[in-house]
Image (spheres, helix red, strand yellow):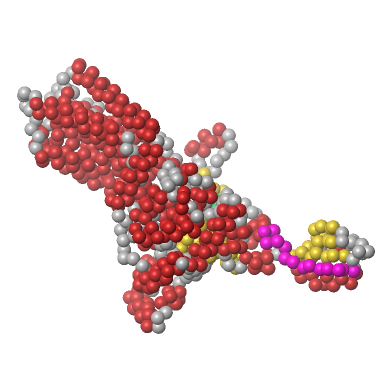
């Protein structure tokens, strides 16, 4: 009847964006409250780190993570987290419910990639507030680094492109982790600990990896770098941006290359897990 | 009128799709290893099938060729077994269950064989838990079967190939797929994009469907504010927007009032007749079935118990006739028990249920013993017969043990 057609993924995604916006606007006060609550959490977080840096100039000796370097790190964390919160979090949370009530049926009927459909169909626009806050913090911190008298930061276009690229890699790694976790709810029937589990794991990703690189932190560092690569998510882009001196050091180069491998690996693994899990889907009886 | 024109256009366009379909068919055959015979290599078969295709092309009988090979829907020995965790009473048993789980196998579908031709409207009847929904889910590829095979339009449903998924739709009366907080039209637009329906065609179909179902003014209202019946109509529209060739309807009229039920029946009848699509429907409302389907498949405990016309059920399963007698004014109504079960006596009328084979003989006796003014012999009401059929235990082999289909295992 028709030649082999590919569903227009970009167009469908735009409709997801649009529909979600329409939905959030119908519950306007909820939207405002969400913006405010996530913003205040960010501000408290920031206050906490300001307090810490009133006690110390750096995180550990010779790590290069001074106050503003760390704030670049922090805003990088925020960028990546808001992305995940905006696009994947609402869907992953809903996924468990889709499984439990058998509504995944409809996603499986659609002539479009199921993983795409279920991981992007709801978008949380309120994450924009945090994204903008992260932007302000980022620009301010980078500007501080560039304006400081000794060893000022010089920003090249290449560094910016590299930063954006690794931001994207980080988002992909976290997405893969999240969708793999969500997929387990097909096997478990219900997985409400998803959110907690997610919090436990990503909590480790929120700090520079130098923190782990000594003593008994090493096993943790190994685990969260090579097995579940959440440590590279923020560390690689933040380090490239805030400590370009280290750009040429072998360890940074190694990490940068490894981050790409980890990104591809996580994504492939998540797709494999998702597809495997779908085979066990049993659709709640109706 | 517009539907007719459209369906005409569809058919003339669909001729080139037969080739594609047949190719799908070949690959599925080869994939299934049916032609792994060393003597007849798959190449030879390929050539033969192509030859056959060319021959029938010459004869201008492509549809016949297609049918020659297979029905639109073919189901062979399809079975689905669910493994369910056997929950125990009490806390102690629950704790023990953490370490040592007992599972039970529920055989939802137990070896179904069925062929459905293009353009048929088939009803699945069966008591709760018979396996109707499970069968529809298998055919739409939502779940994988435990055993057996099925093809719909040459595709294996649970492979979930996009070309297949573009050509059918599933509507479930108890689940909804529209975005709850948005007007239905937003969901429709999403469907248009996912199914790659051209905008002009989409608008035409949408106008047509909303006119037929009379919901034009509800398009802009959030779905959560619609009534059950209105929502069901929207679900139907959503499912039909991409003009599916095969439609699976699982209790589309559940919970609707008589008027809404009737409306949906009329719509389905009209739509099916114009578009000549193939529909499988399950419903517990006999009215739906009587109004829509010539062919009825009775499923009980995961097996097909009957396949034929609705009225045929009475012939096959009811061993009795209902005989209503009107007695003369001064005749005493007594002693009817020996002819059959007396259903009611309301002088001067009496109703008895008589075994089918003995109707003639008994009537003769009654007529000679009494002065009868009027006799009516009729079949028992359809619903009653169906209730009896449902009450019978499915497979004949385990008539004595109705619970046998759920084996307990570790
Ligand atoms: N996801 C599931 N997990 C476990 N058992 C299931 C599941 N789905 C269905 N079953 C079992 O399979 C059997 C058939 O269920 P199915 O939903 O197909 O029945 P049905 O004919 O549609 O009944 P109804 O008329 O009540 O809708 C039932 O015994 C049910 O308990
Ligand atoms: Mg059902």
Residue A98: give x, y in percent of width and height: 43, 44
Whether A26 is drawn above or below B139: the answer is: above
Residue reaching furthest to the top: A55
Instruction: Answer yes or no: is residue A248 visible.
Output: yes
- The quarter of the picture where residue A77 lies is top left
Span shown in magenta: B371-385
Residue positioned 64% across, 61% down in the render = B396
Residues B385 and A141: in front is A141
The correct choice, above or below, for A62 with respect to B281 in the image is above
* Residue B118 drawn in magenta: no
Tell me if A147 is positioned left or right of B370 in this view.
Answer: left
In the image, farthest residue toward the front = B217
Q: Is residue B374 left or right of residue B39?
A: right
x 59%, y 51%: residue: B257
Q: Nearer the viewer, residue A206 or B42?
A: A206
Q: Quick one: quadrant of the N terminus of chain A?
A: bottom left
Magenta includes B380? Answer: yes
Q: Residue at left 38%, top 67%?
A: B28
Q: Measuring from the top left, give residue A38's x and y in whole percent.
A: 32, 29
Residue B161 in the image: above or below residue B104: below
């Amino acid at each position: 009847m028709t030649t082999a057609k590919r569903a227009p993924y970009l167009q469908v995604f735009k409709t997801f964006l649009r529909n979600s916006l329409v939905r959030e606007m119908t519950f306007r006060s909820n939207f405002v409250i969400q913006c405010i609550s996530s913003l205040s959490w960010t501000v408290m977080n920031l206050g906490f780190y300001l307090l810490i840096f009133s006690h110390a100039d750096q995180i550990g000796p010779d790590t290069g993570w001074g106050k503003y370097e760390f704030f670049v790190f922090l805003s990088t964390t925020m960028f990546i987290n808001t992305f995940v919160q905006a696009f994947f979090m609402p869907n992953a949370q809903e996924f468990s419910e889709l499984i439990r009530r058998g509504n995944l049926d409809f996603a499986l009927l659609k002539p479009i990639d199921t993983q795409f459909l279920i991981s992007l169909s709801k978008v949380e626009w309120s994450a924009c507030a945090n994204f903008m806050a992260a932007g302000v913090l980022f620009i301010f911190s980078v500007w501080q680094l560039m304006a400081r008298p000794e060893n000022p930061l010089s920003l090249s276009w290449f560094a910016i492109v590299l930063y954006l690229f690794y931001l994207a890699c980080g988002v992909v790694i976290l997405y893969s982790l999240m969708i793999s976790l969500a997929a387990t709810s097909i096997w478990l029937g219900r997985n409400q600990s998803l959110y907690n589990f997610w919090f436990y794991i990503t909590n480790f990703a929120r700090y520079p990896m130098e923190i782990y690189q000594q003593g008994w932190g090493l096993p943790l560092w190994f685990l969260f770098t090579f097995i579940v690569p959440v440590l590279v998510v923020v560390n690689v882009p933040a380090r490239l941006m805030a400590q370009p001196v280290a750009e040429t050091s072998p360890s940074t180069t190694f990490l940068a290359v490894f981050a790409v491998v980890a990104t591809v690996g996580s994504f492939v693994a998540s797709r494999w897990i998702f597809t495997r899990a779908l085979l066990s889907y049993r659709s709640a009886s109706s | 009128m517009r539907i007719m024109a459209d369906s005409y256009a569809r058919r003339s366009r669909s001729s080139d799709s037969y080739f594609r379909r047949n190719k799908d068919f070949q690959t599925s055959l080869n994939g299934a290893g049916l032609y792994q015979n060393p003597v007849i290599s798959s190449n030879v078969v390929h050539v033969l099938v192509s030859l056959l295709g060319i021959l029938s092309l010459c004869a201008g009988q492509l549809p016949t060729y297609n049918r020659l090979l297979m029905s639109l829907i073919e189901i062979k020995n399809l079975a689905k077994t669910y493994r369910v965790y056997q929950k125990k009473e009490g806390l102690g048993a629950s704790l023990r269950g953490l370490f040592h789980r007992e599972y039970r196998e529920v055989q939802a579908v137990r070896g179904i064989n069925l062929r459905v031709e293009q353009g048929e409207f088939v009803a699945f009847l069966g008591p709760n838990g018979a396996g109707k929904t499970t069968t529809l889910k298998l055919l739409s590829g939502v779940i994988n079967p435990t055993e057996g095979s099925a093809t719909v339009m040459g595709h294996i449903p649970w492979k979930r190939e996009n070309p297949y998924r573009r050509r059918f739709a599933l509507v479930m009366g108890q689940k909804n797929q529209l975005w709850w907080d948005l007007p239905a039209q937003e969901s429709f637009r999403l469907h248009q994009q996912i199914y790659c329906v051209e905008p002009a065609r989409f608008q035409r179909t949408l106008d047509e469907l909303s006119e037929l179902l009379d919901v034009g003014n509800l398009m802009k209202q959030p779905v959560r504010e619609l009534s059950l019946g209105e929502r069901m109509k929207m679900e139907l529209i959503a499912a039909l927007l991409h003009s599916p060739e095969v439609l699976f309807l699982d209790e589309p009229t559940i919970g609707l009032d008589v008027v809404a039920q009737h409306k949906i029946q009329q719509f389905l009848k009209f739509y099916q007749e114009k578009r000549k699509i193939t529909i499988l429907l399950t419903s517990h409302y006999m009215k739906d079935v009587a109004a829509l389907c010539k062919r009825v498949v009775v499923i009980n405990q995961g097996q097909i118990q009957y396949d034929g016309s609705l009225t045929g059920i009475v012939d096959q399963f009811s061993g009795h006739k209902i005989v209503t007698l009107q007695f003369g004014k001064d005749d005493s109504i007594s002693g009817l028990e020996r002819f059959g079960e007396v259903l009611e006596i309301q002088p001067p009328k009496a109703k008895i249920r008589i075994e089918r084979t003995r109707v003639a003989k008994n009537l003769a006796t009654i007529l000679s013993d009494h002065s009868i003014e009027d006799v009516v012999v009729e079949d028992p009401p359809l619903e009653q017969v169906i209730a009896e059929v449902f009450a019978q235990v499915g497979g004949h082999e385990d008539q004595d043990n109705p619970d046998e289909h759920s084996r307990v295992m570790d």
